[in-house]
Image: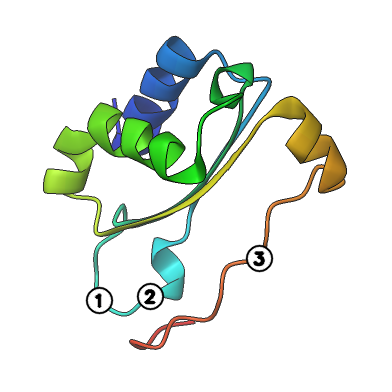
């Protein structure tokens, strides 16, 4: 399996998301790494009553191997179903990379 599939499978297994989107944004950044920059959007009822910091901590813990290795950057957008609906089912756009690239 590749890194993107590994991340998706871990998220699905652990959070049972209502919505999952993992975008490989590596092409927008300088350097030759193909699987190094990702944008992760997860909508899960398991985030209910958890602070944003706690949600991020759970993701970091679950993906510790990937973050210790090939993944250089991971933008997280983590919502409950009602928060996601309030956002009109859209995550924020990623900013342009300052380090060179598209």
* Mark 2 neighbour density, 10 Å: few (under 14) some (14–19) many (20 or more): some
Along the viewing direction, whichever of 35 and 51 lies nearer the viewer: 51
Q: Earlier in the sequence, mark 3 or mark 1?
A: 1
Q: Nearer the viewer, mark 3 or mark 2?
A: 3
Residue at label 3?
Answer: 93
**96 is higher (above) or lower (below) than 94:** below
Whole-number angstrom distance, CA of label 2 to CA of label 1? 7 Å
Tell me whether circle 3 and circle 2 mark residues in contact (CB < 8 Å).
no
Tell me whether circle 3 and circle 1 mark residues in contact (CB < 8 Å).
no
Residue 57's disc number: none
Residue at label 2?
Answer: 29
Residue 73 horizontal side relative to residue 8, left or right: left
Residue depicted at x 87% and y 46%: 88
* Visual colour scheme: rainbow
Determine the secondary structure under disc 2.
Answer: loop
Residue at label 1?
Answer: 31
Q: Earlier in the sequence, mark 3 or mark 2?
A: 2
Residue depicted at x 51% and y 30%: 50
Q: Nearer the viewer, mark 3 or mark 1?
A: 3
């Amino acid at each position: 399996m590749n890194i993107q599939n590994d991340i998706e499978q871990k998220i699905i297994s652990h959070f049972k998301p209502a919505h999952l989107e993992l975008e490989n944004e590596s092409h927008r950044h300088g350097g030759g790494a193909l699987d190094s920059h990702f944008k992760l959007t997860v909508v899960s009822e398991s985030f209910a009553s958890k602070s944003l910091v706690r949600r991020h901590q759970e993701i970091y813990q679950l993906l510790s191997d990937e973050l210790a290795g090939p993944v250089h950057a991971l933008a997280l957008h983590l919502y409950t179903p009602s928060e996601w609906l309030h956002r009109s089912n859209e995550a924020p756009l990623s900013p342009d990379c300052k380090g060179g690239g598209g």
